[in-house]
Amino acid sequence: MRLATRLIWLELRRTPSRLLRPAVTLTVIAALAMVLVSLVDTLDRRSTGVLRAVEADLVVFNAEARQQVLRSRVPRPATIGVGFVDGVHEVGVLSVVPTTVAHEGDQQRATLVGFNARTPAEPVRVLEGRLPTDGEPNIAAIDAALQRTGIEVGDRITLGGSLDVEVVGVVAEAMFLQQPTVWVPPEVWARTGARAFPERGYAETIVGIGLVEVQVGQDPAEIAPEIVSELAEEDLEVEVVPLRQAVAAVPGVSAIRVTFGGLVALSIGVVVLVAAGLALLQVDQDRSRSAELRAIGAGPGVLAGSLLLRLGVTWALASTAGALVATALAAAVPAAVPLAVRSATLALVAALLGVAVGVGGAVALHRIRRIDPAEALGEPW
C-alpha cells in the first residue's frame, strides 16, 4: 500500500489533471444527489416537524381520522383513560388547526398547536425563552421558522385575526405541512379554533391526538393494543400507532419519499456506472506502465491499490466540491424554496457515493489482475 500511495502522490504532482478531470464529472453527479437528498429531507421535515419535535412512543388517533393529525378528534376522556392503562408512564395532548399570524402589519399562514406542558406533547428543544404552561392566557411560543420572519420573544402577535398573544419562547423549527407553528396551551387552541371554524365544534373536551410515553422496560408494541381494548370498553374507538408510523402518515410524505428516493437511487446508479467506466478507462490508459511495474516486481495488489486510491481521491474531491455546491445553492435560493442543507445529510450522501465508487472500481480489478508483465516488451506473448 505504501508503494501505491507513493505512485498516486507522484501522479498528483506531475499530472494533476488526470485526477481532476474525472473528479469534475463526479462532482456534477454528487452535487445533484446532495441537492435532491437535501430537498427531500427539507420537504419531509417541514411537513412533519410537529411530530418530530416531541418525544413519544405512541400516538392515539380517533378511528375515523385514519392517522391524520388534522382530522383527529379524540375525546378528552379517552386521553385521560390512556393514563390508567398498565405500562403507560404519561400521556399528553397535541392538537393542530390552521390559522394566521399577524405581526407589525405582516400576515402569514401558520399552524396553531395546542399542547400540554410537561408531558410527551411538549416540544423538546427550546432555543430561547420558555414554553407556555397549561392555563396561561394569551401566551405562545413560536418555532424558529417564524422567528426568521422577524418575530422575537416579547413581541405580540395576532392569531386568526382576533386573538392577541405574547411570544414567550422559541422552539426548534417544527413546521407542519410546510407552515410554521405557534405553540399555545390547549385552552387558547380551543378558543382560537372555535372562532375560526365554529362549525367544527372545537372545545377543550375534544382534542387532536394523544401522545403516550410508556414506562421504562415496556414494549410500545405490546402497550398499543392494550390501550385500544381498554378504551373500547368505554365505547371509545381509537387507533394507536408508533410515532414513526404517524410521521409517515402525514399527507404527502410517502409520495415525497418514493418520488425523490427513486431519483436519488438513479443518481447513485449513475455514479456506479461512471466510476466503473472511469476505472476501466484508467486501466487501459495505464496498461503499459502497469506492465512495466509488474515486470520489475510489483504485484497485482500494488496495481489494485493504486487504482482504488485514485478512485478514493476522486471521490473525496467530488464529495467535497459537491457539498460546497449544494451548500452555496441552498444559501442562494429564496426562503420559499424548501432547500436546507444539513451536515448529516451531506455525510450520508458522501458515504453512499463512496460505496458506489467502490463498487464501480471493483469492476476494473479483474482486468487489472490480468495484465501480463511481458506486455512491457511491447510484443504480444
Image (tube, rainbow, N blue to C red):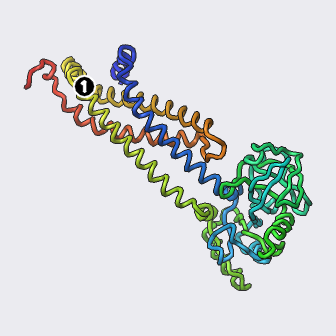
Amino acid type indicated by mark 1: Gln
User: Farthest residue toward the top?
Assistant: 14
Q: Residue at x 23, y 23 (%)?
A: 290
Residue nearest the viewer, comparing 226 with 190: 190
In this rendering, would 120 be left or right of 22? right
Residue nearest the viewer, comparing 74 with 147: 147
Q: Which residue is mark 1?
A: 285
Which quarter of the figure is the C terminus placed in?
Answer: top left
Q: Residue at x 36, y 14 (%)?
A: 14
| Res 81 seen here | no
Q: Position of residue 218 (x, y in %)?
A: 66, 66
Q: Position of residue 39 (x, y in %)?
A: 56, 47
Mark 1 neighbour density, 10 Å: few (under 14) some (14–19) many (20 or more): few
Residue nearest the viewer, comparing 247 with 152: 152
In this rendering, would 72 be left or right of 370? right
| Res 248 seen here | yes
Q: Residue at x 82, y 64 (%)?
A: 189
Which quarter of the figure is the N terminus placed in?
Answer: top left
The answer to whether residue 341 is above or below residue 304 is: below
**Secondary structure under badge 1?**
helix
The answer to whether residue 44 is above or below residue 287 is: below
Q: Residue at x 37, y 43 (%)?
A: 270
In which image quadrant can residue 119 be found?
A: bottom right
Q: Position of residue 356 (x, y in %)?
A: 39, 41
In this rendering, would 21 be left or right of 333? left
User: Farthest residue toward the front?
Assistant: 105
The answer to whether residue 319 is above or below residue 75 is: above
Q: Position of residue 86 (x, y in %)?
A: 72, 73
Residue nearest the viewer, comparing 236 with 178: 178
